């Protein structure tokens, strides 16, 4: 303040002289000469004083407290204190930046340009460049560069370009370009670039680019590019993000990447890439592959879902009614895509005094040959129940069907073709002796193995209509 006051006083003293020198009066030459000499003397003094003041400032440390407030601070090589202001910097601590600082309990300083140690915590008014160590926490109002180590927390109110290690949490209110390690939580309120590791969660409200790993959850509410790995839930506004979650992965917006979840993957917009889940995959628009027990796609652009049951709103969905050499009446539902679809089927028949009721599941593919002609290849496995609704022992009918279809109307086709059938039965009577199954109408191969497993093979035919 004294230096600034000196500058203002010098300028104020020089100003009247300048005004007098510009006066339009031109009386005597001696007076003019005297005025010129006076002006020269005061101007010289003003320049020297101003130069001296700014030279003094240039030796101080520049601290950017905020974008709209620039302050200058003294720089000291070393300070030690108990708790501010009980220390070597006294009440002037807030206007001094230290190269080496030791706070036995807690400290407050203008800045740090080296290393700082605090028993509990430290608060810096300006920038931190170097390293900070605190038993409790570090708070920096200005820019942070270097590394921070704290038992509980590190908080940066300005830009952070540092590695942060905290037992509890790290918080950045401005841009973060760093690696953060926290026992509980990492939180970024602006753009985040780097890596985040947290025992519980990583939460960012700005754009995120980098790697995130947490024990429970990673949550990014803005555009995300990188990789998220967590034990439970990943959430991101997609861009080019890949997610690995123990329970569920959720992305909003168009996204390119892969999702791997123990239970479920959800993309509410367009997903380009791969989804793999232990139970369910959902994508509003898909350009890629889904692998899961259940898959749902609202609009498939390119690719295919692969799973036990897949539903594609603009995909392949048909209902068939037909007959075969073994099951005289068969109804089947096919869903998925033409490249790969799932089959749910039921059928019934009668043979040698036994009624046959079968329910089965299969997979298939449809190959268009022309606008009206197509070729379907289906593999279906039926459990056949003889004379009852459910036969407790193994009694399988496995069919490989090759059918040709002809489109006769917009939603109506007829089909017919050949099949190869393999029955596998393990039926015994009340005494444990094997009983001949009644599935096959005839057989080209019939063998009973030591474990009472009966295998028969025979060709067949099928025909029907497709809706």
Image (cartoon, rainbow, N blue to C red):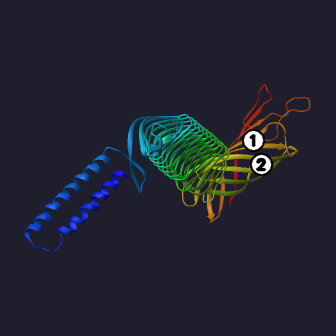
Can you see residue 401? no
Mark 1 vs 2: CB contact within 8 A:
yes
Q: Quarter of the image holding residue 146?
A: top left
Q: Position of residue 296 (x, y in %)?
A: 64, 53
Asked if residue 239 is positioned above or below residue 410 in the image, the reply reads: above
Q: Residue 81 or 322: which is nearer the viewer?
A: 81
**Disc number at residue 437?**
none
Q: Which residue is mark 1?
A: 397
Q: Is residue 66 left or right of residue 415?
A: left
Residue at (26% x, 49% y) in the render: 52
Residue at (75% x, 41% y) in the render: 397
Q: Position of residue 270 (x, y in %)?
A: 55, 56
Q: Residue 380 or 79: which is nearer the viewer?
A: 79
Look at the numbered disc 1 and give the secondary structure of its residue: strand
Look at the numbered disc 2 and give the secondary structure of its residue: loop
Which image quarter is the C terminus in?
Answer: bottom right
Q: Which residue is mark 2?
A: 327
Q: Residue furthest top?
A: 450
Q: Position of residue 93 (x, y in %)?
A: 46, 43
Residue at (13% x, 61% y) in the render: 37
Q: Is residue 345 left or right of residue 201?
A: right
Q: Residue furthest left?
A: 29
Spatial distance from mark 1 to mark 2, Cα to Cα? 10 Å
């Amino acid at each position: 303040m004294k230096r600034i006051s000196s500058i203002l006083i010098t300028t104020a003293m020089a100003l009247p002289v300048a005004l007098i020198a510009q006066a339009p009066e031109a009386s005597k030459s001696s007076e003019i000469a005297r005025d010129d000499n006076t002006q020269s003397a005061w101007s010289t003094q003003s320049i020297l004083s101003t130069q001296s003041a700014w030279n003094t400032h240039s030796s101080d440390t520049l601290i950017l407290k905020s974008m709209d407030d620039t302050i200058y601070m003294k720089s000291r090589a070393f300070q030690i204190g108990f708790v501010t202001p009980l220390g070597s910097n006294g009440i002037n601590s807030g206007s001094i930046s230290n190269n080496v600082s030791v706070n036995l309990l807690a400290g407050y300083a203008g800045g740090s340009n080296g290393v700082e140690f605090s028993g509990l915590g430290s608060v810096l008014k300006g920038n931190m460049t170097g390293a900070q160590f605190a038993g409790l926490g570090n708070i920096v109002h200005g820019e942070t560069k270097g590394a921070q180590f704290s038992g509980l927390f590190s908080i940066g109110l300005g830009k952070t370009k540092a590695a942060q290690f905290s037992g509890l949490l790290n918080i950045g209110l401005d841009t973060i370009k760093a690696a953060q390690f926290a026992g509980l939580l990492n939180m970024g309120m602006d753009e985040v670039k780097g890596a985040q590791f947290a025992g519980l969660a990583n939460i960012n409200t700005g754009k995120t680019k980098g790697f995130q790993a947490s024990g429970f959850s990673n949550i990014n509410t803005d555009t995300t590019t990188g990789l998220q790995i967590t034990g439970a839930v990943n959430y991101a506004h997609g861009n080019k993000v890949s997610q690995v979650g123990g329970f569920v992965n959720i992305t909003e917006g168009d996204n390119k990447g892969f999702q791997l979840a123990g239970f479920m993957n959800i993309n509410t917009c367009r997903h380009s890439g791969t989804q793999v889940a232990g139970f369910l995959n959902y994508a509003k628009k898909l350009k890629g592959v889904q692998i899961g027990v259940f898959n749902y796609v609202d609009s498939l652009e390119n690719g295919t879902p692969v799973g036990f049951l897949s539903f594609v709103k603009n995909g392949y969905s048909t209902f068939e009614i037909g007959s075969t050499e073994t099951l005289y009446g068969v109804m089947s539902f096919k869903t998925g895509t033409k490249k790969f679809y799932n089959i749910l089927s039921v059928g019934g028949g009668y043979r040698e005094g036994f009624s046959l009721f079968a329910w089965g599941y299969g997979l298939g593919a449809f190959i268009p040959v022309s606008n009206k002609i197509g070729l379907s290849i289906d593999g279906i496995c039926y459990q056949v129940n003889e004379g009852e609704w459910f036969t407790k022992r193994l009694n399988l009918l496995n069919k490989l069907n090759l059918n040709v279809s002809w489109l006769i109307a917009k939603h109506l086709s007829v089909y017919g073709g050949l099949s190869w059938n393999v029955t596998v039965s393990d039926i015994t009577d009340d005494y444990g002796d094997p009983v001949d199954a009644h599935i096959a109408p005839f057989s080209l191969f019939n063998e009973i193995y030591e474990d009472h497993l009966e295998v028969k093979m025979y060709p067949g035919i099928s025909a029907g209509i497709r809706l």
